[in-house]
Image: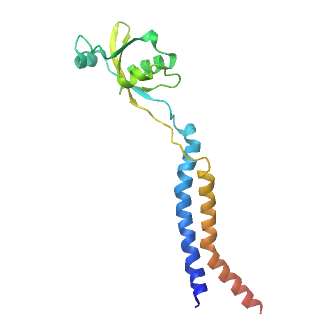
Amino acid sequence: MNADSTIFTYGAPLVGVLLVAVGIAAAVPGAYALIQTDITSCGTPTIAVESPEETASRFGETPSLQLAQLSFDQLSQAEQAAFVEALTDPLGEARVAGAFPNSPSFVNGTLVTYEGEQYYATVVAENPCFEAAPLQFPLGVFAIALGIVGILTPPGYRKLVELEENTR
């Protein structure tokens, strides 16, 4: 067995396997970045709302002056919908799907006055969208295809040599 044959027999499949591994590592996150908005609600933060009793036990009768205080009417429609949904949710959480103009207040924690009672509300998860390079998915698929060619080259070459020898 000569050196060229050894490199061809073992080197090409090794490089092929490495290309497949790199291609998978690139294609999977690239594909997820493309479809994530269809399968999850990324970009919509999650807020948590505590009951008036929990709010009173946390802050006492006089809440901190540094804590933002908002009335329910000051909230956007998306914030209002999430607030009301969080009140009925067993965990007290809901996602804000839409405009979130009071985001800085919610991130730092805010007291929301709703139906005459105060509720502590805060953002508990930002839920950012995963970002990937635009060509990450297609280049990953290309690397996988090229790797498969590298893996299949030696057996294909041996079949060709065998066919050529059989025709003689």
The outermost residue toward the right is 167
| Percent of width and height locating residue 112 | 37, 14
Q: Which image quadrant: the C terminus?
A: bottom right
Front residue of 1 and 84 = 1
In this rendering, does residue 89 appear at all?
Answer: no
Q: Indicate whether 137 appears above or below 80.
A: below
| Percent of width and height locating residue 143 | 60, 61
| Percent of width and height locating residue 54 | 27, 19
| Left or right: where 84 falls relative to 148 | left
| Residue in the image at 58% along x and 51% along y | 136
| Residue in the image at 53% along x and 50% along y | 29
| Residue in the image at 61% along x and 71% along y | 150
Q: Quadrant of residue 10?
A: bottom right
Q: Quadrant of residue 64?
A: top left
The outermost residue toward the front is 66
| Residue in the image at 53% along x and 67% along y | 18
